[in-house]
Image (cartoon, grey):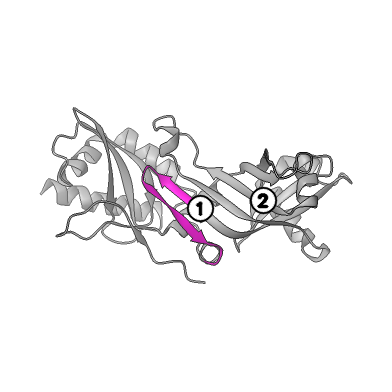
Amino acid sequence: MTPDPPSHAAGGTPDEPPVPEPSHAEQARTLVARAHEGALGTLSNRVAGSPFVSLAPYAEEPVGHVLLLVSDLAVHTRNVNHDPRASLLVREPDVGERDALGLGRVTLMGSVTAVSGGDEEEVRARYLERHPNARYWVDYPDFSFRRLEVDDVYFVGGFGVMGWVTGESYRQARPDPLMHTAEGIIQHVNEDHPDALRLLAVDAGIEEAEEARMTRVDRLGFHLRVRTPDRVRGLRLPFPEESRTPDAVRQAMVAMVRRARR
C-alpha cells in the first residue's frame, strides 16, 4: 500500500513553497509504532454512558489495528463487553524540553473485538515481542487478546498542527523509516553539532538565533527549536533529498551545512 503524500509544514512565503513533511497519517502511525502504552477510553458499564480511562499497554499490527491483552477482572474489559466502542490516546515521549501541549499525540477511535482462534498465535507472538514481561501472565485463564479496530484518527503534532485522519488513510500509511533511530540522531546532533544547527537556523532567516536544537527528524527533514533574545521559535528544514537511514541523514546535513557556510 502507498502512504499518503507528504503534507506541508506551516511557514514559507508566497515566493517560497512550504516545507514538505510526512502526512498526518504517517506521523500518527509513527507515533503509535514507537510507543508501548496509551490511555484507553471506554464507556462505563457501572455508570452508564460515562467515560472511563485506564492505562493500556499495546502492540500494533501491520494494518494499523491495536492489540490489547486484557483480564476479565479489568474494568475496561467489562466495559467493552457491554459496549465495544473505545479510543486510545498515545503521546510522544516527554523529552523534558518542551511544553506538554507541544508534544505530538494521536487518538485512535474504533471498536474492540475478540481475537479469533486462527489469529491468536500470531497475535500472541507480536504482543510478546513488544511486551516480553507479559509472558508471565499471558496464559492465565482470565486473560485474552482483544483488537481495537481503528475507524477514525485525530492527530496533534504540536501547537497549531492538528487534524482528522480517516481510518483508511491511517491503515495505508507506514511509520517513518527513521522511527527507531531518530532519538539517537537527535541526541548526537544536539550534543556534537550545536554550532551547525545554529548556522542552519541563521541561514534559514533567523539571523538573531542564539541557540538551535533538533527536536524531531524524519525522512523528509527535521524540526529545530530556535532561541532568540526575545522568544523561542520553531523551524522546519527539509533535507536535500529523502533520507531513510542515519547515514543518509548525516550526508544530507553535511551538505546543508556546507551550503550554509557558502
Q: Secondary structure at mark 2?
A: strand
**Residue under label 1:** 154
**Identity, as a three-letter code, of the amino acid under mark 2:** Ala
Could you tell me what secondary structure mostly forms the magenta stretch? Answer: strand
Residue 139 belongs to magenta span: no
Residue 15 appears in which quarter of the rendering? bottom left
Q: Which residues are magenta?
A: 154-168
Check the image and report above or below for 81 versus 44. below
Decide which of 45, 205 is in the foreground and name it.
45
N-terminal of the two: label 2 or label 1? 2
Does 97 sit left or right of 63 as displayed? left
Q: Residue at x 87, y 45 (%)?
A: 142
Q: Position of residue 206 (x, y in %)?
A: 17, 40
Q: Residue furthest bottom?
A: 1
Question: Would residue 213 be found to the left or right of residue 51 on screen?
Answer: left
SS under mark 1: strand
How crowded is the residue under tag 2: few (<14 C-alpha within 10 Å), some, or many (20+)? Answer: many
Q: Is 158 left or right of 150, judged from the image as shown?
A: left
Q: Nearer the viewer, residue 164 or 99?
A: 164
Say which residue appears at 34% left-offset and 61% top-offset. Answer: 242
Q: Is residue 161 above or below residue 220?
A: above
Q: Which residue, given by chain and number where applicable, does mark 2 sit on? A: 86
Measure how far apart labels 2 and 1 are at the Cα level: 14 Å
